[in-house]
Image (spheres, helix red, strand yellow):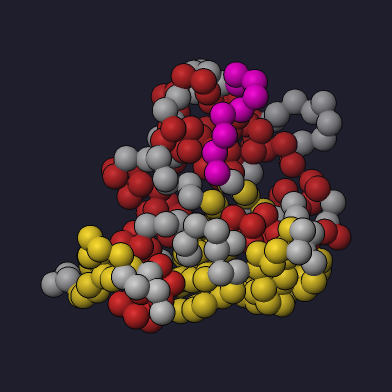
């Protein structure tokens, strides 16, 4: 199953936020979405989930308009983690993760054995099983992000849309989350927003780079994360070079470059 946008345009009160965005997300590649603050990354994700309605263009899930799907049918396919907010009610970790199974349950239906097993597996994968009974208000920011990811994993979606899911996690947990997402991307479409160029350089299969609401570039890390592109999009001078191990190192200069 794939998720596709065609000539997607969106704005508020006459201000164009996204302009003519066309892309396809499908299994097989770990795709990261980059761009400066205000370039439209979070807005694009919200359009791809069907939460926002485009001014023009379309979002197609397996060839059908995303908004033609009923909420439950859409939720079975799309696992969504937006920028984490503390839940309004003080649910426990296990309760939050179980909410990821809601699309598979009828109203008032109690979770069955398969649901409980999916929740246990997801909590173990994201290393939050030891926190199962803890109220979410007692979690750190990084712990809460891993709980929300576990909830998305518990739903067993075919596509994951993730908005900065590791912004608060420590380096060890960040690496583990990225390993899981890369592994999941082999059979599941995964699109993840990040601001971390170094992270993107060494874990992405594909990078989408936004600038001022347009898709500036689409390709491999080697193709996209060049000194010229970083300067053009971020107004930042940086050295980009290969490490002896074959990775990519990005070293920003302390001064900000002049915008072209």
Relative to 193, 20 lies left or right: right
Q: Front-most of 22 and 120? A: 22
Percent position (x, y) of residue 51? 74, 52
User: Quarter-wise, where is residue 155 in the image?
Assistant: top right
Which residue lies most toward the front here? 258
Instruction: From the viewer's side, name the closer residue of 229 and 130.
Output: 229
Q: Position of residue 87 (x, y in %)?
A: 61, 28
Q: Is residue 259 magenta?
A: no
User: Is 137 located above or below residue 6 in the figure?
Assistant: above
Is 90 one of the magenta-colored residues?
yes
* Rendered location of residue 78, percent (x, y): 67, 53
Residue at point 42% right, 46% down?
166
Q: Quadrant of residue 143?
A: top left
Confirm whether residue 51 shows in the render. Answer: yes
Please tell me which residue lies in front, 53 or 99: 53
- Magenta range is 83-91
The C terminus, quarter of image: bottom left
The residue positioned 74% from the left and 42% from the top of the image is 103
| Nearer to me, 16 or 204 | 16
Residue 5: % across, % down: 69, 72
Q: Is residue 247 left or right of residue 57?
A: left
């Amino acid at each position: 199953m794939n998720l596709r946008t065609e000539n997607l345009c969106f704005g508020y009160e006459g201000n164009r936020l996204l302009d003519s965005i066309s892309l396809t997300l499908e299994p097989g590649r770990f795709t990261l979405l980059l761009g400066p603050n205000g370039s439209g990354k979070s807005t694009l994700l919200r359009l791809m989930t069907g939460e926002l309605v485009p001014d023009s263009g379309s979002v197609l899930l397996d060839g059908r308009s995303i908004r033609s799907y009923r909420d439950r049918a859409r939720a079975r396919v799309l696992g969504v983690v937006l920028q984490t907010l503390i839940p309004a009610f003080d649910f426990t970790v296990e309760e939050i993760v179980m909410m990821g199974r809601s699309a598979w349950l009828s109203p008032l239906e109690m979770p069955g054995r398969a649901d409980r097993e999916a929740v246990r597996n997801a909590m173990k994968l994201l290393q939050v099983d030891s926190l199962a009974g803890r109220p979410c208000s007692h979690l750190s920011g990084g712990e809460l992000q891993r709980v929300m990811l576990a909830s998305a994993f518990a739903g067993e979606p075919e596509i994951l849309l993730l908005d900065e899911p590791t912004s608060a996690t420590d380096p060890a947990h960040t690496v583990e989350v990225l390993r899981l997402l890369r592994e999941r991307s082999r059979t599941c479409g995964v699109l993840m927003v990040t601001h971390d160029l170094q992270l993107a350089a060494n874990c992405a299969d594909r990078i989408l780079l936004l600038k001022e609401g347009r898709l500036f570039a689409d390709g491999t890390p080697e193709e996209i994360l060049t000194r010229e592109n970083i300067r053009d999009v971020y107004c930042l001078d940086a050295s980009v070079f290969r490490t002896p191990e074959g990775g990519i190192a990005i070293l920003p200069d302390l001064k900000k470059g002049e915008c072209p």
